[in-house]
Image: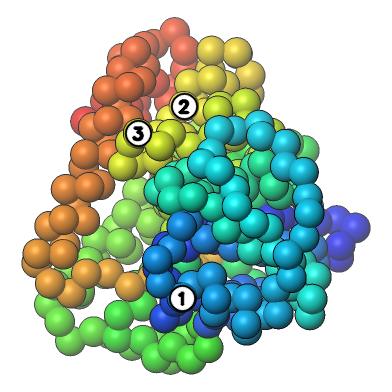
Amino acid sequence: MDEIYSKPVSIIVPAYNEEVGIVQSVRSLLSINYPSLEIIVVNDGSTDMTLQKMIEHYDMKEIKKVIRKQVETKRIKTIYQSSIISNLFLIHKENGGKADALNVGPNFSHYPYFCSLDGDSALEPDAFLKVMKPIIDSNEEVIASGGSVRIANGCKIRNGHIIKIGLSEKPLVVMQIIEYLRAFLMGRIGLSRHNLLLIISGAFGVFSKHWVIEAGGYKTDTVGEDMELVVRIHRMVKERGLKKKIVYVPDPVCWTEVPESISILRRQRRRWHRGLFESLWTHRKLTFNFVKGETNWMEYPLSL
């Protein structure tokens, strides 16, 4: 894709105590095939060597920059820019949680679109070319786009890239693989077709910065900040009577590891379902509201 026909994207990577994999994750992002992007690592008050690892490996130098606080966040302590990779930035801030770290993105980023990406996720090199296509082709009608997430357990990973796709021998992981395939390759394709998506995975999603700022950014008092933001944007668009879309693209592949033990899986699912309940309860006025559009009366009760 030629730079003339693409839209620049800022990749926001929230990091808290990620000293083991942060350098490798950033290295993987630097090899992404996309004409114009910047990478912003937000160190959310890590207590380990995450900050030092980034500074040493990428020769980060402190810079002075005024940040327009369009979304509330915890205090930013220091801003760094790599002296060897000009589009790589590091922001050191007080700890405020993942949602607070993500909110630094709209405030600091230089581009009209940003991607929320987990620090331990691995992207296919051409993922952005595919996930940005519906946004570019829609003349700003599409304001958010999500990609498919696949499970990396059992795969061979080198330098943040999937070298060989494999299948885990653990039954719990296999069950989650089937679940992910059903959710991403069946459920979300149909929901996206009718503009009914209520969630874009926090592991990999692109948003219009303007609309995220209009919505007030990610909420820091919920555990399901990714879903709550999407539902809030839907609600805002419907209330204003606008025709905007949030879509899902099955082609982009983001790889992430899933729990291999029942105890960790239980904690994860409790968090997911709590986030789901909080989002649905916060925006409960959308339930069975036939006046405001399809998103309200079809997908909302379905999520219940």
| Dot in front, 1 or 3 | 1
- Per the image, the residue denoted by label 1 is 49
| Residue 255 visible somewhere in the drawing | no
Closest to the observer, 38 or 63 = 63
Question: Residue shown at 71%/55% (left/top)?
Answer: 9
As helix, strand or loop, the secondary structure at mark 2 comes to helix
Return the x and y of residue 14 as percentages of the image width and height.
Answer: 50, 58
- Per the image, the residue denoted by label 2 is 232
- Per the image, the residue denoted by label 3 is 221
Q: CA distance from mark 1 to mark 3?
A: 27 Å
Q: Quadrant of the N terminus?
A: bottom right
Return the x and y of residue 51 as percentages of the image width and height.
Answer: 54, 70
Residue at the extreme right of the image, as rendered: 4
Q: CA distance from mark 3 to mark 2?
A: 14 Å
Q: How many marks?
A: 3
Return the x and y of residue 233 as percentages of the image width and height.
Answer: 52, 28
